[in-house]
Image (cartoon, rainbow, N blue to C red):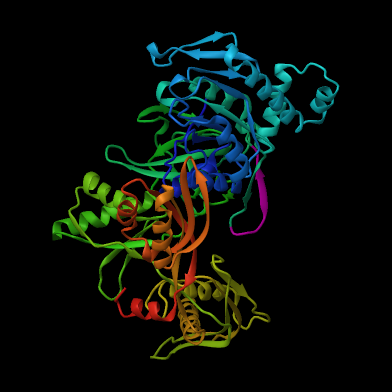
Amino acid sequence: HQINIIDTPGHIDFTAEVQRSLRVLDGGVVVFDAVAGVEPQSETVWRQADEYNVPRICFVNKMDRIGADFARTIGMIRERLNGKPIAIQWPIGQESDFRGIVDLVTMQAYVWDDDDLGATAKVTDIPDDVLDDVEIARHEMVELIADTDDDLMTKYLEEEEITVDELRAALRKATVTGKATPVLCGTALRNKGVQRVLDAIVYYLPSPLDIPAVRATVPGTDEIVLRHPNDDEPLAALIFKIVTDPYVGKLAYFRVYSGVLKTGDSVMNTNKNRRERIGRILRMHADRREDVTEIHAGDIAATLGLKQTFTGDTLADSSEPVVLEAIEFPEPVISLAIEPKSTKDQEKMGLALRALAEEDPTFQIRTDDQTGQTVLYGMGELHLEVLVDRMLREFKVMANVGRPSVAYRETITRKVEDIEGRFVRQSGGRGQFGHVVINMEPLEPGSGFIFENKIVGGVIPREYISPVEDGIKEAMSSGVLAGYPVVDLKVSLYDGSFHEVDSSEMAFKIAGSMAFKAGMQRGKPVLLEPVMKLEVVAPEENTGDVIGNLSANRGMIEGMEMRAGLQAVKALVPLAEMFGYATRLRSMTQGRGTFTMEFAHYAPLNDNLAKDVLSGKR
């Protein structure tokens, strides 16, 4: 069997890596810490996997650590993740005495030898000291698997013997359809249980052939077409990651959903409507690369030589082009200013930042209109720290870096109607004429932007509608209060007029932009700030200080729970109050507290704080 494994970071700042991997994978292995159980980041990744309907198995790691508890972790998966875990193994020994596992499906025990670092496992009889627990666990496993399969349930109720093959087949079906999640255990550091994870991937997770046909659209239309995981179908491949390699240049990772991709092929990038020629095709083995001449449906590889292709683009057969659903990434919430130390670094910095932004869709670069400064936007302090460090190490750019600051947004708070945008220019020869009338209304937080074309009777010709939308989108990049991007509103274009000779796409683009800016002024604009979902884990005696500090910093406490002898506090806190929180928490808990946070939503800033932001005090 060939298994493509993509390892993703656990830190929330690198959520894009998880998002893009889930988009192209058929199954997942979710790794839990046997001591901590379900952690906040586990919840985020689990939720992302649910969104993409990715079947998964779980591996409870670090079974040799003090405080490891397999049964408790399974309970947490069930309660906190709303999962359907089924233990298919049982540990032999606990903590420092952990030496092996019992396979509950085959009822065989595997014991690893510490002398060869877990390279070999001995198959033995089930030790007497775990036999009772194993029999209870197996009974529960069979019952849970039978619950997902009517034929098996009948056999189970009639107390007929259920074979190993029947159990595996039913569990595979339940896993692929999301009705069950097999749970295994071990300790990766000592290679105990790892080999069985690979077996479980083969037994229970889907192969590309088990996955339904992928939906795609015909470029420029809403027509849906299906692409089956078959070599005989026309090519459809999705680029899910770009990496700039200092030795070979731009590496584009892709997943082939249908057809075959060969070295030297001329293919169509259907998002950009441009042809690309496939250079070398590489099968990636961590830091080792293997040259291959072709990649088949269902497989993952990387290629060199693509000029205009980026993350989320589709490569397709030019005779039957399709566009696959792109990958959605969260918006960045934190920013910092950066400037090169010398003129020599200026050009190098531009090239470095462009290369890094090509790799990471959650990293954005903007130029501040007022100061001319380059501003970097990312998902968190660590995210930007890593990117700046890479710029220094990989691209040898020396730069001065400012302090992180909050990425505010703007929106309107009331509906405004009949907003006109009129652009007329007569200066000899052909003039310019564009005239639009729009309505604007606020949307729920997180809704993004909706453009609605309500033009009837051809008062604005069809070819000018898209330029109006483009003009509005461009204007949204800089709001009227302080130049922050505008979010969460709907614009309806319902009237306007045109001139047979003087109208042009540019004139309507400018008219759309003018109308939007006028509507923002009338729509009672407000500043929005990012609010973070925070979880602090600290000793119980420090809980009062932690809660008091969060409340004093505009935090809203959502709940508390005991976890492995510590108190976990959940809260919603504005990002602006979280800079330097690691130092504050260390001091409150004598270094014993930890925290994780992720973006929750944008919320309006109160008037006093908004004034501080607008005056530059905050």
Taking the magenta stretch, the answer to whether it contains residue 441 is no
In this view, the residue in front, 234 or 81, is 81
In this view, the residue in front, 399 or 446, is 446
Relative image position of residue 289 (x, y in whole percent): 37, 29
Q: On the rendered structure, is 554 left or right of 185?
A: left
Q: How many marks?
A: 0
Q: Is residue 303 visible?
A: yes
Looking at the image, residue 550 lies above or below residue 43: below
Residue in the image at 69% along x and 26% along y: 141
Residue in the image at 48% along x and 20% along y: 98
Q: Is residue 309 visible?
A: no
Looking at the image, residue 294 lies above or below residue 407: above
Relative image position of residue 236 (x, y in whole percent): 56, 42
For the N terminus, the image quarter is: top right
Residue in the image at 27% along x and 54% along y: 351
Taking the magenta stretch, the answer to whether it contains residue 224 is yes
Identify the image quadrant of residue 611.
bottom left
Q: Which residues are magenta?
A: 220-228
Relative image position of residue 157 (x, y in whole percent): 84, 25
In this view, the residue in front, 447 or 466, is 447
Q: On the rendered structure, is 183 left or right of 145?
A: left
Q: Residue furthest front?
A: 541
